[in-house]
Image: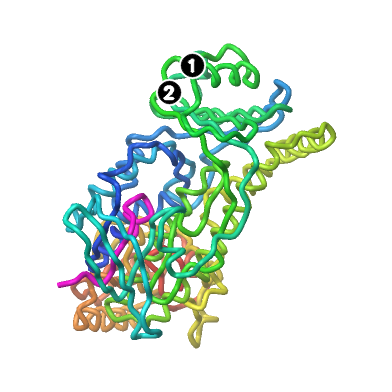
Amino acid sequence: MTAPVLVIGAGPTGLTAACALWSLGVPCRVVDRRTGPGTAPKGLVLWSGALECLHRLGVARELAGQALELTGASYWSNGRRIAGARFGGLADTAFPGPLCVPQPVTERALHARLIQLGGGVEWETEATAVSVHGDGADASATVRLRSADGEETVRVPWLLAADGARGPVRDSVGIPFEGHTFDRTFLIRDGLLAGAPADAEVQHHISPDGVLVIVPQPDGHRIFFDIASDELTEPPSDELLQRLLDERGPGGLRLAGTWWSSRFQVHAKVAPRFRAGPVLLAGDAVHAHSTAGGQGLNTGVQDGYDAGWRLAAVVRGCDPSLLDGYEAERRPASVRAVRSGDQQTRLWLLRHPLARALRDAALRLLSRRGVLETKVVPLLAQLDLDHSASPSVADLDGAAGAPRALRLGRRAPDAGLTPVQGRALLSLHSHLADGRHTLLAYGGDTVGAQAARIQGTLRERGVADAVKVLWVRPAHTAHGRTGVRPAGLEIAYERGGTLGGGASHWFAYIRPDGVVG
């Protein structure tokens, strides 16, 4: 049987989408022109929003075991520390701070998980052309694939393109790439750095000649610089990197071994559309970021997860209009992430003495008032996204009875729970972490009876594996005895009474991404 979804690209974005599809009961075919999982440690930092997606797929804990927990960031100008921000203070998440995990580690973990779920990747298989046929419910995509076995033309109901900034799909379906490229060349190097501080703080050294960023890794450090644009393509020499390190660094740092280096251009681009009928585009195929803040990998992982759960739902019978929310939600998130990286990079590259002095003064003030931690860090974490304007979220009659803590289009809040029946999970977020569609039913025995009937209907429709019902009884009933105990229904008492918000009963739909839908 032909898989209903073809995923082009097996980087973090494509693998995330494929794992989301398989975990929700939808097989997909994955192709990639490379010979195997990536080895270049391009992306390095995983923030909370992406880590929650990876946790729903079952790989975040494995990654955390191989990661370095970053403690904060500091900013230096003219050899003096002018600002700093601590990491690890984000509330209401199992991942309160960023982790440093080289991209190949993430790719290998996702690839292993995909195989465990029943999927795989067809390596050395390249998509050379894509065309769209029909429109509406009858639309499909035709893809020409080339591999060592020859050429193949396949027609699929749905196509997810995660084939990178230079991939053919975006151009094939007529979507441009809008934005700009910085007129500086950036040099990057991973390896040992003798004399570096022992703590796990990211340092930004901003000089009139350019920037030096030092990022601690689990087994070494990453450094990168900007220089005047050149036409060279080979990796930078250690001699050049050491000279720049001496000129811009705090002193006493020596390159002690290099295992990867490169030179690259920094772009700030976002495609105007993320979809062309049955073709959805994700990751670097539709947004290109500055390295500042490590947003590219994170935004791509969240694109992949969002596209994956939506496509799985539509393949299994949900209204295809659910896919209208993909571009409506992911493009604004991408624009915000690209803009954030662009602004940081521009601040690094200021040359005029007055502009530099104003920047330094502003950073000092923002640091002193804690704004870097309360505003900038949550922006980088990408947990606070607002999807309330999306066409795929909508209130029903009676929504006014739901607590104010459940905001439509926003991430569901956490709440302490005491299990009665089902798995021994002690919080709402732990129930949502399996990445299924969840109907949250709050109230007494009458609500429980309704929840039981819904659970039975889900089983009859054959979707109980992708949708679950969680009945939460109010805290003040914790010493009562419920007579409603249907098989498969998860029941818990709320601890503390904050989730109820004064309402006696309500129902809410929580999407696989943890957003109130």
Work out how far the residue at label 2 is from the one at label 1, CA to CA, in angstroms: 8 Å
Reading the image, the residue beneath label 1 is: 255
Q: Residue at x 33, y 79 (%)?
A: 445
Task: Categorize mark 2 by other alpha carbons within 10 Å: few (<14), some (14-19), many (20+).
Answer: some
Residue 401 showing in the rendered view:
yes
Q: Answer above or below: position of 287 versus 501.
A: above
Residue at the right extreme, as displayed: 354
Residue 447 higher or lower than 76, as above or below = below
Q: Quadrant of residue 468?
A: bottom left
Tell me where the magenta segment starts and ends, as one range.
1-17
Q: Given the image, on which type of amino acid does mark 2 rest?
A: Gly
Query: Is 427 placed left or right of 206 in the picture?
Result: left
The quadrant the N terminus occupies is: bottom left
Residue 338 vs residue 487, the one in the foreground: 338
Screen quadrant of the C terminus:
bottom left
Give, as a three-letter code, the residue at label 1: Leu
Q: Nearer the viewer, residue 28 or 195?
A: 28
Closer-to-camera residue (63/149):
149
> For this view, does 238 lie left or right of residue 134?
right
Q: Inspect the magenta stretch and tell me whether residue 344 lies in it.
A: no
Q: Residue at x 29, y 47 (%)?
A: 34
Query: Where residue 416 sits in the image (x, y, percent)?
Result: 41, 57
Task: Check if mark 2's residue and mark 1's residue have beta carbons within 8 Å.
Answer: yes
Give the residue at mark 2: 191
Determine if residue 476 is in view.
no
Residue drawn at the location 43% of the way across and 67% of the way down: 172
Location of residue 319 with respect to 82 vertically, above or below? below
